[in-house]
Amino acid sequence: MKISALLRNLIFISAVLPFASNAQNDTNCFYISLKPEIIAKTDVLIKKYGREKNISFMTHDAKSNSLNQRFQIDNDFSYGDSTIIITNDNASAQNVINLSKKNRIPLVFSLIRPQVSFLSFPKAWFVGPNEALAGQMQAEILNEYIKSKGNIDKNHNKILELVIMRGEKSNPDTITRTTSLMSGLIQHGYILSPMTENYANWDFDEAYRIMGIQIKKLGLENIEAIAANNDDMALGVLKAIQEFGYNKEDPDKFIPIVGIGGDSAVLKAVDEKVIIGTVVPDLDTMAKITIELITDSSLTEQKIRDTYKLKVENRNVLVNYSEQKNF
């Protein structure tokens, strides 16, 4: 009887242990939406580096619905041993922090910085783009373009008549991208007169609609440059002005547009010289660090600084941007 019981125990242990080992490599990926190209690219890279470490992923696409994402977190969180989340919903962010803290499993906010604090939980991090750098690089591209043309001051008032297509009102990324763009241009000696305050909520259709209104209000002949807080809005702006014959074949009917993001459609537009440039976040490094954070509990801020030469503060890891320009 004792031998029989021992054998049963050994069989039970041998069956359970491999399952437990696999469970340690299960990661929940909660995405507010996989439709934006930048999130889809991030997901591909996260899985590329994760599979190199034998991680299996459970992917949850909320399809731009915050209630869906909250439901997915409530129902599926317990099936993972680490969590990666991209969200713009404060309730989802707070919930995933609370659950991760309760279960003491690693948590990484990717791409979109949460607007709720995660610092009370030592295993929680943010890894995303350095948004201040994005605006500064937009300013560099615009300055380089203006210098190459000699002068784009249409009404000779020595003021850069600039339209800024902003993201979501009160969103930290909107504020940071916009203020760093403006401060960068001021540092280059430009006097600015932002012509309107436009908030298109990161959306192509909304940017197209708003730009149509501004064209009628301001007149395209009075607009000297356009900066968009992301590439989707840059494309919406481009569509609106092209309907009036701008940024096509006539060099006298051209307004420089800059975006942020590196979407494939914008890179194509840059190649065709209808958008002068965009700035592209280093998604590869972002994904690589994300996977390291959920697999290596010994990783510290200083190790990340030393390895990647990035700005890291309060468990916020900020990856760099690069320019794509053509004019």
Image (cartoon, helix red, strand yellow):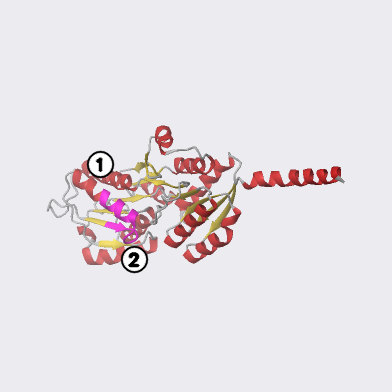
| Picture coordinates of residue 199, whole percent (x, y) | 31, 62
The residue at 37%/53% (across/down) is 231
Viewed as shown, does residue 118 lie left or right of 25?
Answer: left
Viewed as shown, does residue 212 lie left or right of 265?
Answer: left
SS state under label 2: helix
Occupied quadrant, residue 309 = top left
Residue type at the position of mark 1: Glu
Residue tagged 2: 209
Name the mark on residue 301. Answer: none
Residue type at the position of mark 2: Arg
SS state under label 1: helix
| Picture coordinates of residue 327, whole percent (x, y) | 30, 43
Taking the view exactly as shown, the residue that stands out farthest to the front is 2
Q: CA distance from mark 2 to mark 1?
A: 29 Å
- Asked if the residue under mark 1 is in contact with the one under mark 2, i.e. CB atoms within 8 Å, the reply is no
The magenta stretch spans which residues?
A: 164-180
| Picture coordinates of residue 117, whole percent (x, y) | 39, 54
Q: How many marks?
A: 2
The residue at 21%/41% (across/down) is 147
Mark earlier in primary sequence (2, 1): 1
Does 169 lie within the magenta span? Answer: yes
Q: Residues within 10 Å of mark 2 (few under 14, many from 20)?
A: some
Specify whether residue 118 is in view.
yes
Taking the view exactly as shown, the residue that stands out farthest to the top is 306
Viewed as shown, does residue 277 lie left or right of 13?
Answer: left
Specify whether residue 65 is in view.
no
The residue at 53%/64% (across/down) is 71
Taking the view exactly as shown, the residue that stands out farthest to the right is 1
Foreground residue, 50 or 104? 104
Residue tagged 1: 144
| Picture coordinates of residue 177, whole percent (x, y) | 31, 51
